[in-house]
Image (cartoon, helix red, strand yellow):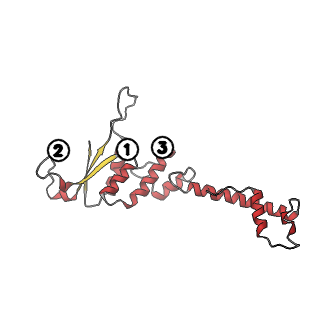
């Protein structure tokens, strides 16, 4: 990021653009009326520069604070999966996930999307299960196997003693991912969610 210019730096920058000659000689005199006019214009440049710096920082969705509401509106939050509430870090993550979900097509895309939440998943086609040799759990799909996606979540249990009340059963992130994956799956496919 470039250095912040002071008002005097901005005034000197404006003075440097003025031509030479007797008329503009007072541009570098700190007590002249011309320098006072340049300082007045420079203060507005200083303010504009501050707005530009704020915009440059806030336009990045994983760093924004001031523009979080705008980012949420832009990606359609709140919706059936994301409530638009929580800490600023959670809200930023939800915006990033919604942006990342715009191009989800392959199994690796689903894996990468879950990784944004720190969740490890495996994605397999239903056609790779239910055949011989059979492994447990046994899945019998029939022709629907070619249109079934199996998502297995690998989550460490976070419920350990001593527990604080009220106890939350299940992982909130897994529910969020299931909601999101259900929206992102191809229309002709079924999803099966499993926790391992």
Tell me residue 6's x, y (percent): 74, 55
| Mark 1 or mark 2, earlier in chain | 2
Mark 1 or mark 2: which is in front?
2
Cα distance in 3D space between marks 2 and 3: 37 Å
Q: Which residue is mark 3?
A: 86
Q: Secondary structure beneath disc 1?
A: helix
For image coordinates 44% across by 50% down, the residue present is 94
Q: Secondary structure beneath disc 3?
A: loop
Where's the C terminus, which quadrant?
top left
Mark 2 or mark 3: which is in front?
2
| Mark 2 or mark 3, earlier in chain | 3
For image coordinates 50% across by 52% down, the residue present is 62
Other residues around mark 1 within 10 Å, as few (<14) / some (14–19) / many (≥20):
few
Q: Which residue is mark 1?
A: 173
For image coordinates 35% across by 40% down, the residue present is 171
The answer to whether 23 appears left or right of 111 in the picture is right
Other residues around mark 3 within 10 Å, as few (<14) / some (14–19) / many (≥20):
few
**Is residue 162 visible from the viewing direction of this image?**
yes
Tell me residue 48's x, y (percent): 68, 60
Q: In the picture shown, does residue 20 fall above or below 126?
A: below
Q: In the picture shown, does residue 152 fall above or below 45?
A: above
Front residue of 5/65: it is: 5
Front residue of 131/6: it is: 6
Q: Quadrant of residue 46?
A: bottom right
* Numbered label attached to residue 144: none
Where's the N terminus, which quadrant?
bottom right
Other residues around mark 2 within 10 Å, as few (<14) / some (14–19) / many (≥20):
few
The answer to whether 123 appears left or right of 131 in the picture is right
Q: Which residue is mark 2?
A: 137
Q: Quadrant of residue 56?
A: bottom right
């Amino acid at each position: 990021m470039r250095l912040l210019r002071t008002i005097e730096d901005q005034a000197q920058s404006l003075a440097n653009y003025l031509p030479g000659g007797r008329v503009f000689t007072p541009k570098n005199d700190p007590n002249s009326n011309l320098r006072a006019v340049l300082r007045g214009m420079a203060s507005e440049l200083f303010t504009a520069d501050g707005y530009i710096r704020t915009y440059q920082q806030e336009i990045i969705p994983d760093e924004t604070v001031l523009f979080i509401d705008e980012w949420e509106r832009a990606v359609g939050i709140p919706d059936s999966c994301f409530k638009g509430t929580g800490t600023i870090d959670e809200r930023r993550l939800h915006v990033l996930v919604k942006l990342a979900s715009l191009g989800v097509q392959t199994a690796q895309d689903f894996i990468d999307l879950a990784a944004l939440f720190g969740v490890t998943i495996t994605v397999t086609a239903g056609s790779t299960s239910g055949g011989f040799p059979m492994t447990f759990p046994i899945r019998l799909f029939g022709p629907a196997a070619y249109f079934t996606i199996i998502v297995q979540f690998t989550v460490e249990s976070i419920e350990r003693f001593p527990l604080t009340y009220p106890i939350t059963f299940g992982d909130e992130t897994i529910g969020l991912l299931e909601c999101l994956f259900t929206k992102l799956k191809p229309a002709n496919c079924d999803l099966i969610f499993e926790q391992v």
